[in-house]
Image (tube, rainbow, N blue to C red):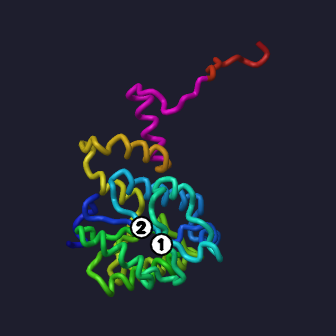
């Protein structure tokens, strides 16, 4: 396996690290609502393509709070791999979960976590040092305590061989070809909901150019313009 080989649903697995409220409170590197949108979109993408996903948490009861409910709603049966260490690689459950899936040929590990400069970096470096896995760090579904902290952590990881990604890049590499109709509709729905201007453009093209129905169930009347004073 090579880092020049694109991501596929068959060669990938995903790990979500510490996407918990108290960790998100400290994020200053990007808008936190955008970050949450992105990581939820990423998890939905993994669900669409049946990419195995591990969720690991740190000090849930004592400090960090529960994983975002939007993530748990997507993967309601996923085990939550609780830790005390900031470095997920220090916990044997995490190693075992990744190793089980890597044994199926899924050695490209896609990562989204908080914070970039601590939990993401230590995990990525340790995992690379100890295995033959590849790490794909989803920068816009991760966050640091400052923009500098996030950026320099990404730089450090890239220098060590980590591949930087965005969540939408991951989604579209997994889809790869719009002729893959078995996932087409689900991907388009995900884009419409989570991809900002791209999703708005899809909505516009579908409804205004291709005369598709709007994707709502609005049943109220549309009232024609009435000039004031008429």
Res. 116 mark: none
- Front residue of 106/78: it is 78
Q: In what quadrant of the picture does the C terminus appear?
A: top right
In which quarter of the view is residue 63 placed? bottom right
Residue appearing at x 59%, y 77% in the figure? 59
Q: Residues within 10 Å of mark 1 (few under 14, many from 20)?
A: some
Tell me which corner region of the image, top left, top right, bottom left or bottom right, holds residue 84: bottom right
Say left or right for 150 vs 93. Answer: right
Q: Is residue 190 magenta?
A: no
- The picture places residue 152, in percent across and down from the top left corner, at 48, 80
Q: How many marks?
A: 2
Q: Which residue is mark 2?
A: 54
Q: Which residue is mark 1?
A: 81
Q: Is there CB contact under 8 Å for labels 1 and 2? A: yes
Range covered by the magenta-colored residues: 197-219
Question: Which residue occupies the foreground of this view, 204 or 227?
Answer: 204
Q: Is residue 171 above or below residue 184?
A: below
Q: Earlier along the polypeptide chain: callout 1 or callout 2?
A: 2
Disc number lying in front (1 or 2): 1
Say which quadrant the N terminus sits in: bottom left
Q: Residue at x 27, y 44 (%)?
A: 178
Q: Residue furthest left?
A: 1
- Residue 138 position, x and y percent, is 42, 67
Question: What secondary structure is marked by label 1?
Answer: strand
Q: Is residue 90 above or below residue 79?
A: below
Near mark 2 (Cα within 10 A), the count class, few <14, some 14-19 or many ≥20, is: many
């Amino acid at each position: 396996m090579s880092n020049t080989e694109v991501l596929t649903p068959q060669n990938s697995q995903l790990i979500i690290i510490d996407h918990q409220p108290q960790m998100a409170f400290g994020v200053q590197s990007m808008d936190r609502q955008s970050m949450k949108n992105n990581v939820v979109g990423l998890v939905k993408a993994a669900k669409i393509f049946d990419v195995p996903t591990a969720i690991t948490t740190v000090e849930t009861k004592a400090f960090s709070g529960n994983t975002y409910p939007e993530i748990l709603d997507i993967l309601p049966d996923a085990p939550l791999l609780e830790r005390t260490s900031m470095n997920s690689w220090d916990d044997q459950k995490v190693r075992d979960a990744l190793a089980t899936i890597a044994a199926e040929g899924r050695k490209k590990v896609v990562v989204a976590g908080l914070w970039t400069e601590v939990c993401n970096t230590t995990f990525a470096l340790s995992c690379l040092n100890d295995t033959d896995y590849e790490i794909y760090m989803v920068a816009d579904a991760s966050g640091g305590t400052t923009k500098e902290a996030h950026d320099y952590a990404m730089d450090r990881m890239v220098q060590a061989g980590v591949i930087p990604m965005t969540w939408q890049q991951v989604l579209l590499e997994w889809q790869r070809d719009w002729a893959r109709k078995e996932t087409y509709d689900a991907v388009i729905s995900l884009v419409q909901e989570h991809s900002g201007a791209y999703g708005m453009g899809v909505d516009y093209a579908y409804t205004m150019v291709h005369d598709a129905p709007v994707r709502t169930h609005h049943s109220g009347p549309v009232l024609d313009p009435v000039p004031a004073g008429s």
